[in-house]
Structure formats: C-alpha cells, structure tokens
Image (tube, rainbow, N blue to C red):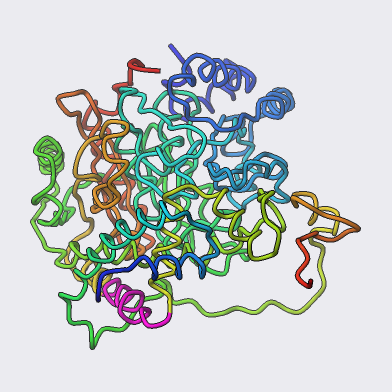
Amino acid sequence: MSLFNYKLSELQDKLHTKEITVSDLVNESYARINEVDDDVKAFLTLNEEAARAKAKELDGQAPSQSLFGLPIGIKDNIVTKGLRTTCASQFLSNFNDPLYDATVVQKLQDANAINIGKLNMDEFAMGSSNENSSYFATRNPWNTDYVPGGSSGGSAAAVAAGEVFFSIGSDTGGSIRQPAAFCGVVGLKPTYGLVSRFGLVAFASSLDQIGPVTRTVEDNAHLLQVLAGHDKMDATSANVDVPSYKDSLNQGVKGLRIAVPSEYLGEGVNPEVKEAVLQALKVYEDLGATWEEVSLPHSRYAVAAYYLLSSSEASANLARFDGVRYGVRSEKAENMIDMFKLSRSEGFGDEVKRRIMLGTFALSSGYYDAYYKKAQKVRTLIKNDFEKVFENYDIVIGPTTPTPAFKVGEIIDDPLTMYANDILTIPVNLAGVPGMSIPCGFSSEGLPIGLQLIGKHFDESTIFRVANAFEQATEIHKKTPVLGGVK
Amino acid sequence: MAEISKEQVKHVAHLARLAITDEEVEKMTEQLGAIIKYAELLNELDTDQVKPTTHVLDLKNVMRKDEPRKWINKEDALKNAPDQENGQFRVPSILE
C-alpha cells in the first residue's frame, strides 16, 4: 500500500519504529510527482535537491519534532528563503531568492517537515479556479477536464493526487475551502489572527488567513497545532492561548446544536450538493446532534461587499510592485511613471488588473463613502448575523460551494459568475470566524462535494470535533481519485 | 451611481499606475460597469446607524522599543532588484 494512504500519526509511528526512513517518504513524494504532475500541474517550483539533502540529514536522527520528516507543499504566495516565490505571477517570475522565511515556513522547519516545493495558485490569490495562474492551470485529480478550484488549487490538488502528505494554502474569500471541496480533501481557514500572516504576500490584509490542507481531519488538527500561535512579527496576530486540537477530536457530537442557514440551501445550490449536505446532517442526527434551520439574512450581500473590500485592500497592497526593488521591469519605459505603469501592465494578468482597477475606483475621491465605507458597514451586519446564531448554536453547517467543480474554461470570461462561486465561503472571511471543508459525498459525475463547518471565533476545537465525528462515521474520505482525462 | 465611463476607466488606470490599451479600456469599462452595478445591491440596506468593521479583531497598535537590530544588509536588499548600480537601485532619470 502506498505511504500516502496513511495518516500523519501512522507515518510518525513508522518512522519511530524505523519501518520507513525520511528518504523513503521524500522519494515516494517525488516519484508520485514524476508520475502524475504532468497531468495535475500542481507544482510551480520543486525543492528537490534541498529536500533530499534534508531527508538524508534526518535519516540519521531520532524522530522528535511533531512533523519530523513529513513532505509538505507550500502555496507560492508564502515566502520561502532562497526558494523562488512567484505568487503565480509573471511579475515575480525572477524572484528567485527571497530574503526570509514566512513565520509558518519557519515553524514547519522547526517541526522538521520537508518542503517539497511551491504550489500553483491563481495569480496573487485572485481567483476561484486556478485558471488565473500566469504559468499554467492546475487540473482536478478526480477528472482533469475540471478545475481544482482556487486560489489554493495547487495545494488541494497536490494532496488529493498524493504528491505530498499535506500542504499549506491561504484563504481570503474561500481559497482553501473551495478547492478542498472540489478536490475532496480537508481544508481549514482558521480564525483571522490565529496563524501568522508574516511572509504571506498580502492580497486583502483584513481577510487573508493561512491554513492547512490535508487528507484527514486528524492530520489537519495535527498541522494547525504547529501553525497556530501569536507572532510578534505580525501586528494582526491574536495573542490567544492555543488549545490541544488533538484532545477535541474524539469528543463526539452528542447534544451538539447545529445551525443550518436557509440561505445556504436555497436557490442556486445544486440539488446533488443539497442532498449530500442533508445526508450529512442525517449522520449527525444519528450521532446524537440536533439541527435547525436558521437565517443569516445578510448573506446575499456578502459577495458584493467582499469584492469591494478585498479589491480595495488589494489595490493598496499591490502598489508595492513597482519594478524597482524586486520583480520584473519593463524595458520599454523612458521615464519613472512609465516604468511603473508598463512594468505593472506587463507583469500583472487580467484578473489582477481588474481587481486593482475596481479597488482604486472604490477608494477614489467621491466614491469612498458610497462603496468602500458602505461595504465595511455591510461587513458589520454579516458579522452580527453569525454572532446572533452562535448565541444559540455550537456550529453552523452548510455546503462549501453551490456546485461541484466546473469544467476548465467554462466560466473564466464571466467574472460575476465566477465570483458567485464563493458565495458560501465569503461571509466566513468577512466575519473572521473559522471554517472548514470536508468531503461529504460525490456528484453523479464522480466529483467531490464539500461540507462546510463554521465555528465561533477561535473555536477550531469544535470544528475538529464535529468534522472528525463525520469522518469516523462514514467512508467518504477513503475514496481516492483516479487520474485521467486530458493532458 | 451613473454608469462607469471610458474616461473614468482611463483615469482610474492612471491612479493605479497601469498602462492599458484602448482594447482593454473597452473591456474594463464593460466588466467594471457590471461589477459596480452589481455592488449597487448594497444600497438596498439602510446602514445609517451601522458602524463600519475595518477589522474583526479588537486590535491595539503595539509599538516596539526603538532599538537597533539586525535585519538585511545593503547587498541582500539589492540582490533581487531588476537594476542596480553602486549599491543603489537604478531607475530612469526624473530630471531632464
């Protein structure tokens, strides 16, 4: 049996008993990449030489740290010292030698995880399909005619295809949960502030959050344990105690009160997705939980508010890409302003330009109150919706996405339809609460369907407990994708 | 809010320091117009008495002590630059 069928804790046991070596794990990871990545296209940059050297070094040591010897993939908007970091943008195609590691990368190294390489994404994390990568589109391992979701599509596809044991993504409006749903893996967006954003190339600073993508819920808890915690290098990092997530895994759901927003099962939600969610709720009933329909009345305004806010923040964050200190510079420019304009126009792709333009417009003189401030106020209403529901319920459950994965090229030229794909994940980012996607079924075409679990601020423990109960009671997570379709 | 015009799109592109072609102006006018029109949905809500949320956490600005510490050196700071000379970033001349 492939090593990829084991949980992280089982692999650790095998390392402890010397049944396998770290080099075995790293070899298996690169062998699988060689076997399938021409089809999946999850990786932008491999770290093979350094990873193999690190594996050899660890082979001589006794396993001690929590991720000892385990191969990981890292989304390419997370800075890695000395390893090319492009954000899947032509603008950073020559950014081969970043000067420092992101805090999460440092934590992974301290835990002795092995960085296998950098994973493809939508350019600067803007997109819901991975088709906005300026290098190539990643494909869905369940059927390569379909998108893996975005923007952490590479992170989800690499885990689903068994190329790495786990990966790190980032989630601004659903960018971990939506691809996790499309690829049938477990993806968590932690509470805003729980995981340091130092070294994450910022898209929308008040919404971005780094999180783990794994095959199982237990693995996800294992990884979050390493990533979570206060960081003095990040002014938005929360100074809160990090509980033991492992302790919460097997506490069961007896007596748990589940809220199911009527807006999350209404118009626009695919019948197969709705049915899979209702079946999951039946599982929870059988396990002793109760559920009731509730309302998150401002959900329908979330997408509009999100695109105004995130694009505004993006327009400010991406102003730093000026062709002076790093990145590409246009050779056509004759003066300073032209240098900025031409470098940015040649370096950024269409979606990035579109959002910079939208954000600049929303922040420009005369429009700030009408768009940006209005959206901030609607954000308050959306946050209040969640807080009200959590007064009476332990967790909110619904679908992660309105539909299963769509075909490559199907809606790429229709920004509004593409944006609507994030309609069920965006409110979670606006409210700053944690959300997880776990596989809960398959469509008639054999594509995974994601169940979204949303918790109170800093209550990841309840999410792990609820997600693990479902995983233990069902066999869905055990199904693995068979690669096929077009190249 | 009136429809977004091509002139507005050109002005916004200048503010955003983006050079855009006439073809892109056409496309952006249409696409931004559609997104802005969609955003008008927010006007259904009366938010006069609602406070804006800029940040979900109750953050306080923490100032560190003003002490020198090690960070990158000049060589490191310059090594990813597309153009450099004599230990400085080189850019097109500003003065004629």
Residue found at x 26% / y 35%: A410
Picture quarter with the C terminus of chain A: top left
> At which x and y percent is residue A62?
68, 28
Left or right position of B70 against B23: right
Q: Nearer the viewer, residue A302 or A164?
A: A302
Relative to A206, does residue A104 appear above or below in the rendering? above
Residue found at x 43% / y 55%: B22
A256 within the magenta span: no
Left or right position of B10 against A390: right
Magenta region, residue range: A365-380
Picture quarter with the N terminus of chain A: top left
Q: Give the image quarter of residue A198.
A: bottom right
Q: Give the image quarter of residue A172.
A: bottom left
Residue A239 visible in the snapshot: no
Residue found at x 27% / y 46%: A414
Q: Nearer the viewer, residue A451 or B50?
A: B50
